[in-house]
Image (cartoon, rainbow, N blue to C red):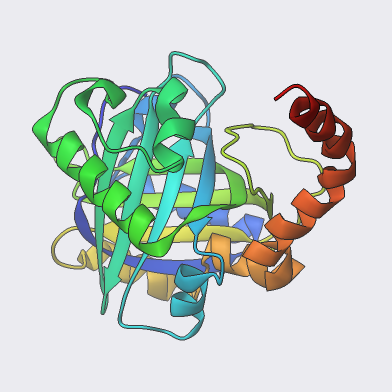
Amino acid sequence: MNTDRLQTQRFELKFQVPEATAVAIRHFVRPYLAPDEFAAGRTIPAYPVHSLYLDSGDLHTYRATVNGDRDRYKLRVRYYDESPDSPIYLEIKRRVDRCIYKQRARVRREFVPEILGGAWPSMRHLIKADARDFAALQKFCELLRRLGARPRARVSYDREAWTSEGNNAVRVTMDRVVVCEPELEPRLDTTFRHPVRPFGEQVIVELKFTNRYPDWLQIMVRTFNLVQGSAAKYVDGVNALGASRFSAAAGASSFRQSAPRLLPVLVAALGTV
């Protein structure tokens, strides 16, 4: 996924629907939208999406969403597979009232632990020297340091995506099998140990448009009696498992569990000084 067709500013409506309704929506959007280019050649235009969410020790960005703050943001690392050559996207997703603003930088996978560890942004981190990507990387690192953010959760799902041809002004996505589990290290895995499914069998339908709300989308919403609601994957995952599993205390607990194994090594090292 080397092409970047990011909607940097958009409106976004979310709905939770059963699978039968999602299939009906697919048939409805076909005359208006084309299959996402990254899923070209498949019967259903779908591909896996993986995100590592970053947050402060007291889960500041999680609480901002729960509290309904009018100006809030999330930091995440997005990737699509485990290939060492695939780009990694460091993303800032900000909501101001009803509008979504996104920035992201395409970086090299090998530099992700370095960046998340607090390294100053550098052009060498990028897939390609690009002014927009570097500005996004600088902003990402600034927010990372300001929050003291670290990895907190990993979220994955299968995304079916339809988009308007040429300008990407309208996107309709359907996310299935959403799973989440705590992840306190900068690992970019695609496998899970004991995940939770915060939405069960429901499909998350998202309508994304950059300008006016298209008439045909409004007709679709009325046709299927869609009820707009919240579907924040990171937040709902944390809610399902409990915030204590994702907080700084959880990281400290993990360290305490590993400390007895580290103690003989530390003693031996001190004896050689």
In this rendering, would 37 be left or right of 27? left
In this rendering, would 125 be left or right of 256? left
Residue 27 seen in render: no
Residue beneath the point at 47% across and 86% down: 67
Residue beneath the point at 60% across and 49% down: 155
Name which quarter of the figure residue 218 lies in. Answer: bottom left
Q: Position of residue 42 (x, y in %)?
A: 50, 23
In this rendering, would 149 be left or right of 91? right
Q: Nearer the viewer, residue 242 or 270?
A: 270
Residue beneath the point at 43% across and 13% down: 85
Residue 5 seen in render: yes
Residue 244, placed above or below residue 204 = below
Residue 147, placed above or below residue 87 = below
In the rendered image, the residue lying farthest to the top is 85
In this rendering, would 125 be left or right of 14? left
Q: Position of residue 68 (x, y in %)?
A: 42, 84
